Amino acid sequence: MPPPTALLPGRSAAPRPSPPPPPPPQLASAARLSRRPLLNAAAVVVRSRSKDEASFTDRILDYIEGGPKLRRWYGAPDLLPKDGSAEDEEDAPSDIEEPRDAVLVTNGDSEIGQMVILSLILKRARIKALVKDKRPTEEAFGTYVECMVGNMEDKSFTKKALRGVRAIICPADDGFFSDLDLKGVQHIVLLSQLSVYRGSGGLQAIMNSKLRKLAERDEEVVLASGIPSTIIRTGSMQSTPGGVRGFDFTEGAAAKGRMSKEDAATICVEALDSIPQTTLIFEVANGDEKVTDWKAWFAERMKTATS
């Protein structure tokens, strides 16, 4: 509740503002994501009782739920104009070198893209995200994410987007890697449903034909880039809670199985800490195998792939 205001003689108190409206769908979605177990059971963060001991997850949740509401409650201006761009925003000179410590997330305003972003925030990574509209993502995640809107076919924008980027997470089959100069990128994590598209038949195969071509093109470019890459071929993606089931990494599992988007996002982020010498490709769907130490799992997988 706003603090009481001293009244001037002869003036009545201003009417109390009505309670803030419910958050828009994007914020509600982000808040729901923050409550779900994005990470495996060993990495779940317990909410703290004391404000002084607030966990990192608590602070994110407080911002998501409280920040936009409080601005409207007190009549403060929005963070950005309606077009989602900063009025006084000026691009940094292109010749300035940044430390290569950022992770670039493509499709940052998609459902799985936001799951990847939230997992990266919990890892305290510096995040750059390609989005169609800055406003929803910046309202959801604030200064934790540098949102970027532009055309990747524009070389000047591509150079800006990749400046300071050490790794790229591409959580969708969208042809992102076509004709890009990836110089300086140290690791690529590509989430692919190529196995699903190849395993479909009849009308479904016709409907998936464009997606299949984009997925094949992305994999071809990544493999030809010579950059250490992790290609994760998942089962059919589902909007189901993560951390509930285990995994199935057997050959053919992706074509037949299903995969929680939250679990897929978790694997993408965990893969960042394990850079292969060349390219690591594996299939995964939800199953019965539990993974409690992803670093050890990736180390064993890379050892098996090179033997």
Image: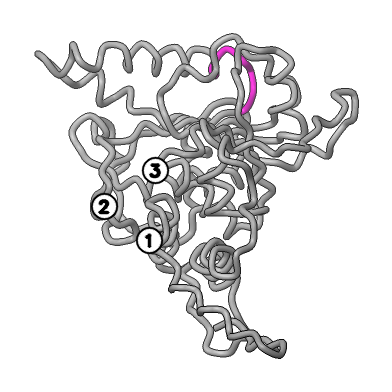
Q: Name the residue under label 3.
A: 111
Q: What residue type is labelled 3?
A: Glu
- Relative to 135, is 241 on the left or the right? left
Secondary structure under the numbered disc 3 in the rendered image: helix
The residue sitting at 26% across, 48% down in the picture is: 286
Q: In this view, does 100 lie to the left or right of 250?
A: right
Q: Quadrant of residue 224?
A: top right
Classed neighbour count for the residue bearing mark 1: other residues with Cα under 10 Å, few (<14), some (14–19), many (≥20)? few
Q: Which residue is at 45% across, 68% downward? A: 20
**Callout 2: helix, strand or loop?**
loop
| Amino acid marked by disc 1 | Arg
| Frontmost residue, 231 versus 113 | 113
Mark pair 2, 1: CA separation: 12 Å
**Residue beneath the point at 41% across and 42% down:** 112
Can residue 285 be seen? Answer: yes
Local crowd at mark 2 within 10 Å, few (<14), some, or many (≥20)?
Answer: few
Quadrant, the N terminus? bottom right
Q: Do the residues labelled 2 and 3 touch (CB within 8 Å)?
A: no
Instruction: Measure how far apart labels 2 and 3 are at the Cα level.
Output: 12 Å
- Relative to 23, residue 150 above or below: above
Residue 11, percent from left and from top: 64, 85
Q: Earlier in the sequence, mark 2 or mark 3?
A: 3
- Tell me where the magenta segment starts and ends, as one range: 222-228
Count of residue discs? 3
Q: What element carries label 1?
A: helix
Report which residue position mark 1 lands on.
32
First along the sequence among labels 3 and 1: 1
Q: Residue 192 at x, y = what percent?
A: 39, 28
Residue 307 visible, this orientation = no
* Horizontal relation, residue 258 to residue 31: left or right: left
Q: Name the residue under label 2.
A: 240
Say if the magenta span includes residue 231.
no
